[in-house]
Image (cartoon, rainbow, N blue to C red):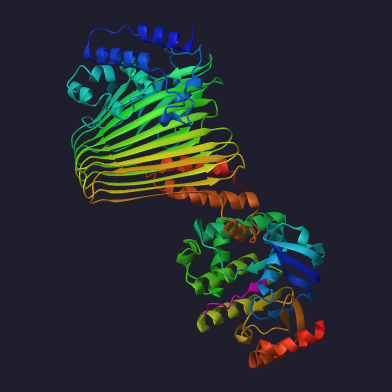
């Protein structure tokens, strides 16, 4: 079987009924069949050769996982947090945990939410990201939406503890293809902290094709962290799509430490007045990793604020890509939108591509962007070495210092400590 | 301790040091004076191992080892210290963390155990008094937003923490007001022992009123054209650098 046949077999195996969700999936399967996978000539996919990843003999079937593996991979200091567990792209209700007091947080299958009192929200938001990504890869995920998860924080409620979404991909039996889908409803006046992280099991290759759609309601606060450290065999194409309603606030931090080919789309849809968002990213790459961050901040209404800072460190033969789009629509007067991307190249064969794209149709706005690609500051290196600090440690100190303003944006202490440790290990600072 | 013979160095195509000879023994304080562009800072940088400069001739022996053959970090670990004319600002690295790394790397090189947190703190508190530097300054990013005087005091503080055998002060007096100058000089004098030595590079005689040198050398156009005792510095102050020029012309004629 070739890759398309494998996917078709998996799609048909779902035995879709006639419900509204099935309709959504069927439509998207048709879209995918028509569009296929994005080719390199597609402007949005210039650096991400997604087509080559798909293998004829992919594992797309469901498979459960030993709960001890979940325990083993729990981030230290987070045992009291709520969790959502995905295994090979399918939501595992029984393995997930709601640690909040009654009436605050709901975690259920997307399929369930699509048929209960949350159905109205589901159909208003499911597939909203396709307005920005009308491509085959997004449609392919949508065709398998029934296996997704739905998370809701009730009106005016504040979660006591963060929620961690663990994505396990098992490649023990060969190439693994997973398609997690999540819909998060941060209702008006609520606050939620979400961490998404990925764990690769087995020695085979994997591809996770994910779509997370979030609606940050009126006056709601969302803290979102995406942490990627899956190892050199893991490919990832993911879209995090965030709609922001009136006076809502989002802080998003994307950390990419390893992977084979990683593509992150992050969309901020500022569709109501006085929305505020902060987008931070750090990609610390080595080997032959390609990490491609595409961000969109779409300002449709007046008085919104966005600030974006992405930093990259590329060693060996790795490649970092940053593409930051800012739209300011005609009605979006008094928009403040800032963007900055800074890169350090360590390896002689490492590369960085950076592309700011500002499209401004309003006349009373403040927008700025800037990008740099450079090497470590020689004067600073010499200063540290002149105090007896080895070249390797001096470099590690400076790189850590470069990364720290992103690290400092992680406001959840155990997560910050964990990421800091991963970064320090990578920089192999030693005395 | 330090023996420089016929040292020559250039940056890009420009020859700056044209044959320096200088010997420094333990316990001595030497001053190098000279007009702008004479090569004073180049000499300091070459001794510390800055890669921008290419050594084109000569030798430097430091405590029986070939200094020019060592990396900047090994020179420091062997006991050489350069107080920078322009200390670098490094956002994101706290002074405390930086100095702890430096101290412990040096201890490791010497085969000593790293200092634990309490020992390190004790040592830091002692040395902070020496240059009247505040704890809050040290928990900030290295030199970031420090005033000129704070940067120079931080240099002397680092020197105190690392207790070098030979310290080179590269125009440490530049940009300092008289109070800061006194504090810096006082720090240096307290650290001065029979075992260590100082090479004070300066444009003005002012600093030498507080750090009294045993020897003064005048650098001009890449060579030491005159050496003497501290009185030479006073003479330079009085007559200006022009007075050495006829000597130099004679010497090269």
Depth check, front residue: A160 or A193: A193
Tell me, yes or no, whether the highlighted magenta stretch contains residue A34: no
Q: Is residue A366 left or right of residue B245?
A: left
Depth check: A115 or B239 in front? Answer: B239
Q: Quadrant of residue A123?
A: top left
> What x and y, as percent, mark residue A34?
36, 15
Q: Is residue A290 left or right of residue B167?
A: left
- In the picture, measured across the screen, residue A202 lies left or right of residue A297, that is right
Q: Identify the main secondary structure in magenta.
A: loop
Residue in the foreground of this view, choosing between A216 and A159? A216
Reply above or below: A400 against A269. Answer: below
**Residue B133: where, in percent of width, then height?**
50, 71
Q: Quadrant of residue A416?
A: top left
The x, y position of residue A297, in whole percent, is 31, 40
Front residue of B114/A86: it is A86
Vertical relation: B1 (above or below) A136? below
Magenta-drawn stretch contains B169: yes
Side (left or right) of A404 relative to A180: right
The residue that appears at 54% across and 33% down in the rendered structure is A289
Magenta segment: B168-176
Query: Residue A20 is drawn in which quadrant?
Result: top left
């Amino acid at each position: 079987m070739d890759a398309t046949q494998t996917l078709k077999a998996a799609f048909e195996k779902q035995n879709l009924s006639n419900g509204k969700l099935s309709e959504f999936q069927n439509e998207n399967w048709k879209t995918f069949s028509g569009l296929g996978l994005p080719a390199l000539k597609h402007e949005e996919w210039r650096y991400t050769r997604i087509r080559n990843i798909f293998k004829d003999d992919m594992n797309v079937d469901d498979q459960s996982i030993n709960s001890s593996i979940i325990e083993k991979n729990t981030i230290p200091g987070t045992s009291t947090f709520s969790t959502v567990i995905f295994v090979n792209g399918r939501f595992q209700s029984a393995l997930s945990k709601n640690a909040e007091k009654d009436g605050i947080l709901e975690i259920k299958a997307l399929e369930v939410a699509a048929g209960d009192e949350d159905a109205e929200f589901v159909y208003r938001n499911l597939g909203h990201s396709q307005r920005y990504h009308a491509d085959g890869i997004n449609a392919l995920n949508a065709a398998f939406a029934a296996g997704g998860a739905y998370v809701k924080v009730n009106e005016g409620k504040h979660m006591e503890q963060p929620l961690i979404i663990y994505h396990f991909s098992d490649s023990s039996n060969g190439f693994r293809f997973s398609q997690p889908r999540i819909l998060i409803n941060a209702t008006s006046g609520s606050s939620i902290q979400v961490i998404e992280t990925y764990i690769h099991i087995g020695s085979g290759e994997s591809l996770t094709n994910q779509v997370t759609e979030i609606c940050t309601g009126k006056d709601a606060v969302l803290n979102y962290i995406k942490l990627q450290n899956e190892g050199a065999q893991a490919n990832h194409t993911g879209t995090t799509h965030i709609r922001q309603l009136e006076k809502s606030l989002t802080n998003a931090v994307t950390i990419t430490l390893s992977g084979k080919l990683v593509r992150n789309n992050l969309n901020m849809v500022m569709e109501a007045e006085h929305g505020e968002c902060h987008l931070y990213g750090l990609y610390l790459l080595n080997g032959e990793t390609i990490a491609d961050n595409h961000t969109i901040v779409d300002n449709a209404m007046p008085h919104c604020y966005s600030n974006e800072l992405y930093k990259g460190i590329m060693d060996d033969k790795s490649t970092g890509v940053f593409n930051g789009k800012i739209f300011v629509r005609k009605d979006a007067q008094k928009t403040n939108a800032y963007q900055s991307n800074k890169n350090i190249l360590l390896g002689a064969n490492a590369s960085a591509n950076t592309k700011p794209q500002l499209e401004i149709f309003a006349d009373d706005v403040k927008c700025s962007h800037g990008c740099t690609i450079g090497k470590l500051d020689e004067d600073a290196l010499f200063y540290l070495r002149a105090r007896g600090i080895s070249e390797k440690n001096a470099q590690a100190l400076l790189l850590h210092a470069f990364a720290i303003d992103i690290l400092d944006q992680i406001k959840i202490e155990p997560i910050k400590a964990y990421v800091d440790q991963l970064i320090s290990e990578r920089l192999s600072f030693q005395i | 301790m330090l023996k420089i013979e016929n040292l020559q160095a250039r940056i890009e195509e420009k020859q700056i040091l044209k044959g320096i000879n200088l010997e420094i023994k333990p316990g001595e304080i030497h001053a190098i004076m000279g007009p702008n562009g004479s090569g004073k800072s180049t000499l300091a940088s070459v001794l510390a191992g800055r890669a921008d400069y290419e050594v084109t001739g000569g030798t430097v022996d430091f405590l029986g080892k070939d200094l020019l053959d060592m990396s900047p970090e090994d020179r420091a670990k062997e006991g050489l210290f350069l107080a920078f004319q322009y200390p670098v600002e490094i956002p994101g690295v706290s002074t405390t963390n930086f100095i702890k790394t430096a101290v412990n790397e040096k201890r490791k090189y010497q085969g000593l155990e790293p200092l634990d947190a309490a020992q390190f703190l004790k040592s830091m508190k002692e040395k902070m008094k020496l240059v009247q530097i505040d704890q809050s300054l040290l928990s900030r990013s290295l030199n970031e937003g420090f005033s000129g005087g704070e940067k120079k005091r931080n240099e002397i503080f680092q020197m105190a923490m690392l207790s070098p055998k030979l310290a080179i002060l590269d125009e440490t007096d530049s940009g300092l007001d008289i109070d800061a100058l006194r504090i810096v000089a006082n720090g240096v004098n307290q650290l001065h022992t029979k075992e260590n030595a100082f090479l004070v590079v300066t444009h003005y005689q002012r600093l030498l009123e507080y750090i009294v040198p045993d020897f003064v050398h005048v650098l001009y156009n890449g060579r030491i054209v005159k050496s003497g005792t501290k009185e030479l510095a006073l003479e330079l102050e009085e007559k200006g650098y022009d007075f050495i020029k006829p000597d130099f012309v004679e010497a090269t004629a």
